[in-house]
Structures are given as structure tokens and as C-alpha cells.
Image: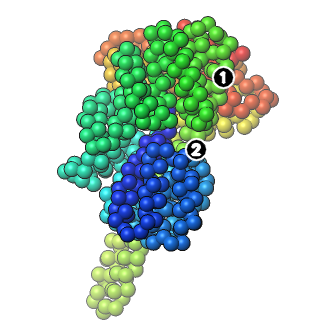
Amino acid sequence: MANLKLNANSIFTNLIFLIALLFSSIAASDEPNSNNELLNLATQYLGSAPEKAFDTFARLEKLRPTFTPKQTDRYYLLKASWLGFSGMHRDRIELIQSYIAQVSDIDSKVKFLYELSDAYTNQGEYENALSAMNQSISLLPQISDMQAKLSMLQSAATLFKSLHAYDDAILYAQRMYLIDPNRSNKLATCLGSSNEIEINFLRGSRNLAKAALPMAIQVCQENGIAAIALMLKALDAVDSVNSGLTEQGLKTGLTVLTEFAKTNENSDYVIQLKEGIARAYLKLSNLNQAEHFADQAYQQAKSRNLVQLLEKTSRTMAAIKRAQGQFSSALEYYDTSLALKDKILDDQLHKNLAYQRVKYDSQDKANQLSLLEQKNKTLAIARQLEKRNNQNLILLVTLISVMLLILTAWLIRIWQQKNQFRETAQIDGLTQISNRAHFIAGGVQAMQSNHAAVSVILFDMDFFKRINDSFGHAVGDWVLRTVAEKIKTLLGKKDLFGRLGGEEFVICAPGASEAETVALAERCRVAIMEIDTNPSGYRFPISASFGVATRAAHASTSFEDMLAAADKALYVSKTDGRNRVSAFQ
């Protein structure tokens, strides 16, 4: 499911916001004012051809002094959305910040906060994006407009998807249903189910996503939201290719691509779809068609600077060039993919740190407010009791003692929760080893001293997808846990061990030479092969491919370069037949 994570979400979220704007334009057009005609025209352009809206906004700017407060709100919302479509997110942030203090209508303020959160996300300022989103969430009980509620919930779901916080994202997707428990509002049903399906694809819950697809597509199509139905079809086609249903995925993908050509050829989903079609043709050994679609996807991603999609398409182009025997060209595409992968990993690390900081700060502020409330209550009780006679003095002392005991117990619980939170932020929940962020932080610290050699071992489970597809994700999780437990028994006290994600693990061995590290990697490889899989309920072989990189003493190589070198060595192991150890040369 890795390629489904490449969705930038911007097309999806801006389309949803435009649906909300269309509703607001219909309501505003009832006002007897010709300014609404231009505002409605700008809305129509944003829904079909944003590049044509420039002249309309120039005309609206001249008429701005004649706007009513409601028209002014609409103008700034439309312009913020247009700046987002145009990629001018810094200007978009400045525009919203200059005006949002003047917005008194709660429904409009939520829409502005949505635009602000989306702009910060596109700028990579994730803490600011989360802060804007939290402001909009706090306004939810006061929101009366259905479209404003949907915009707020969509903003939260989209932001958490980009942060890979899928449990949080799916909660906000499901809350769209709660807006209308009877499901009579089909827009809410379409958006909620579509988000839930996409999130399930992203987090690997393929069966849940596939089961909900037909109904979601039907609801969206029947209610005139064909663009979202088309996006769901694209996800379905790519998933079929990923799942080994190559011919089915190819047939569906080509059909959906034809439908996109009639509506929106610039959608991020078109790039994903072309890349999936290219891989399908590659599996069917039709290299000309594979190259045709992969190159189109690569060029589209490159022209729009979509880093995640560009990394995926360059990796696919490398595989096609290798199959064509063009090894030099394949290596160039692979180097491009590797460089982009490093950039994506750094960006995701920033996202994770921002998410954890904001989540921790929010919890800490809530705890402080609760503590302050408890103290205020205690003081209020004390002041009342002081006015009573001596007969009530015993009661006063008793009550204060009880409150102090409760407060002490509560503070102990908060302290325990904070410790638990810190541990959760460092440990991978499945394997109970270091997660990506914690491991990288430890690795960087280990590299700070260059008085001794430092080595990195990167290994990836071979054909892990087959295990998941053949025996289920529960068995796949068992394999990952068992491998982690086995490897821990082979490591020294100073060695660091972490899971980068999926089936990819990494070891940092401070003070180890290349020869010692290669020997350690070989022991790990053999240990993995010797794992008895019978306790999982099935019998099957497992193995892993290893890449080793070493920084000699007194060298100045960075930890990021070490990971990149180990990844290249891992690639050599995989191309040489897997289940082997390769050292970076």
C-alpha cells in the first residue's frame, strides 16, 4: 500500500472546500447586489479553471469598498482558496492573518481557519497548522452551517492523514456521519465514507476499504459529487495492481484515466493512476506502454514539484529502465528516488515531531487548567468555611485534607500519564523497539563523536507482502514482532535497534568496524532464517536482505549519509537475489 501514501490531498481538500463555497454562493446570490455575480463567477472558476480567476479578482478588488460584511467575508475566502490553488501559500497565510480578526460570524471563521491550516500544511509549518485546526475544533459546538462543519472536520482529517496519525484522522472522518445521524445529508455521507476508505487504504486495512467502496461510489455519484467518486475509483484501480490483480487493475485504471481526461487531468490522483498503470504494464512485460505511462506520471509530478509522487514515479522508471537493460539510466532514476526519499523521511520526521509536541502541549495545558480549577475550588471552599464558627473548624480541616489527598493522587496520575506519553513517543507499538524518530535521534547523537568507527545495518524482510496477502496481517505482525525479539538477543548493550516503518529495520553499532558489523549482519540473517513459524499457525520460510555502511574513525560522514549508504547496499542485496548481506563500497 506504499504508493497510496503519496496522495498530497490538496486536490481532494480544495474540491471539498469548493463544494462548501458553492453552497454559500447560492445563499448569497439571494441578496439584491450585483457584486454577487462576480463573487459567484469567481467561485465557478475555482471549481473548474482556477487560472481564469485572476481577472475576476482584479475586478472584485476595485469593488471591495462597496461590499457588505458578508460579501467581504466571501471575497477573502475565495481569494485565499485561489492563492492555495496557485501555490502561493505564504501570501495566502498573510491574507488570512490580516483579515481573520474582523470575522465575527462563527461559520465563516471556521472556513478561514480551514484555509489557514491547509496553507500552513503546504508550507511545512505543521505546528501552526495543528494550532489553526485546534482553534476550529474548539468552535464546533457553535457552528450552525452544515458546510462549515464539514470543512472543519475535513481539515482535521486531512491534516492528520498527512501526519500519518491515521487513528485520529479516521475519528474525524467518522464524525462527519454524526452531523446527520440519519444519513439524510448525502454530502456528509459521501465525504465521511470517502475519507474513511482512503485512510483505511493508507494504514493497510485493505479489506475494510474495499468493502465500503461500492456504496461510497454510488452515494457520491447519485448526489452529483462525481469527482470524489472518480478519486475512489482511482484508489481502487491502484490497489488492484498492488494486490496482484494486475489485469483487473489495468483495465479499471485505463477506464478511470479516460474519465479523468474529461474532468480534471491535473489531479494528483491522475499521477498515481498513471504510475499504477505503468507498474501493471511492467508486470505484463509490455515495457513500451509501461515507460509511456511512467514517464507521463514522472513529468507531471516533476512539473508540479510533488516530492512524494516524484519519488514514487522515479522508482518505477528505474525498474522499467532496468527491465529494458538501460542500467545507466536506471541508476540515475534510482539516485533521484533515493535523494527524494531522504527528503521525504526528513519531512515526515518534522511532521511527527510537530504532532507529538502539539499533542503533548495540548495535554499539558489541559492538565494545568484542570489543576488551576481544582485549586480555585479548594480556595473557595476555604473562604466559605472561614466564615463559620469554631464548630465547623473540624469540618474545614477534614475537607481540605480530603481535597489535598485527591489533588495529590491526581497529580501522581498526571505524572504517570506524562511518563507513559514520553515512552509511547519513543517506542514502536508493534515491535516494542525504538520508533523511527527516537532511533534517528539516537543515531545522530552516536555520530557526534568521530573518535571511533560507527556502523549502520539496514535490513528489510523479503517478500513480506506475500506473507500478509497469503496468511493475513495478523501473521505479518507476528513475523515483525518475532524478528525484533530474535535480533535483540544478538545485539550489544551499546547497539541501537529501531523500526523505520513497515518491514524495514535498522541497527546502529557504535565502535564497530565494517568487518565486525558485516559479521553481526550475517548472524542476524541466519537467525531470521532459523525462526520457526509454526507458532503463527502456518509454516512458511522467512528471510531478510541486509545493507551495511561504516563510518571510519575521524571521518565526518553524517548519520543521514550513513542511512543512505546502507540503503544503497540493501538495494544491492535485493537486486542480487535477496537473503544476503552487502556492504556499501
Question: Is residue 61 visible in this depiction of the protein?
Answer: yes
Figure quadrant of residue 510 = top right
The image position of residue 523, as x and y in percent, is 56, 14
Residue 92's x, y, as percent?
A: 57, 55
Q: Which residue is identified by label 1?
A: 335
The image quarter in which residue 194 lies:
top left
Kindly identify the amino acid type of the residue bearing the numbered disc 2: His
Q: Residue at x 33, y 86 (%)?
A: 385
Q: Residue at x 68, y 13 (%)?
A: 328
Q: Nearer the viewer, residue 435 or 485?
A: 435
Q: Residues within 10 Å of mark 1 (few under 14, many from 20)?
A: some
Q: Mark 2, residues whose alpha carbon is within 10 Å: few (<14), some, or many (≥20)?
A: some
Mark 1: secondary structure = helix
Q: Check residue 350 in the rendering and tell me which mark sits there, or answer none.
A: 2
Residue 417 at x, y percent in the picture: 43, 52
User: What residue occupies the far front of the structure in this picture?
Assistant: 34
Q: As displayed, is residue 329 above or below residue 454? A: above
Image quarter where the N terminus lies is top left
Residue 166 bears which disc, if any? none
Q: Amino acid at mark 1?
A: Asp
Secondary structure at badge 2 equals helix
Q: Residue at x 53, y 43 (%)?
A: 352
Q: Quadrant of residue 147?
A: bottom left
Residue with the most extreme left position: 182
* 64, above or below 539, in the image: below
* Cα distance between the residues tagged 2 and 1: 23 Å
Q: Position of residue 88 (x, y in %)?
A: 60, 50
Instruction: Work out whether 383 lies above or below 369.
Output: below
Which quadrant holds the C terminus? top right
What residue sits 68% from the left and 32% below the top?
559
Q: Residue furthest right?
A: 554
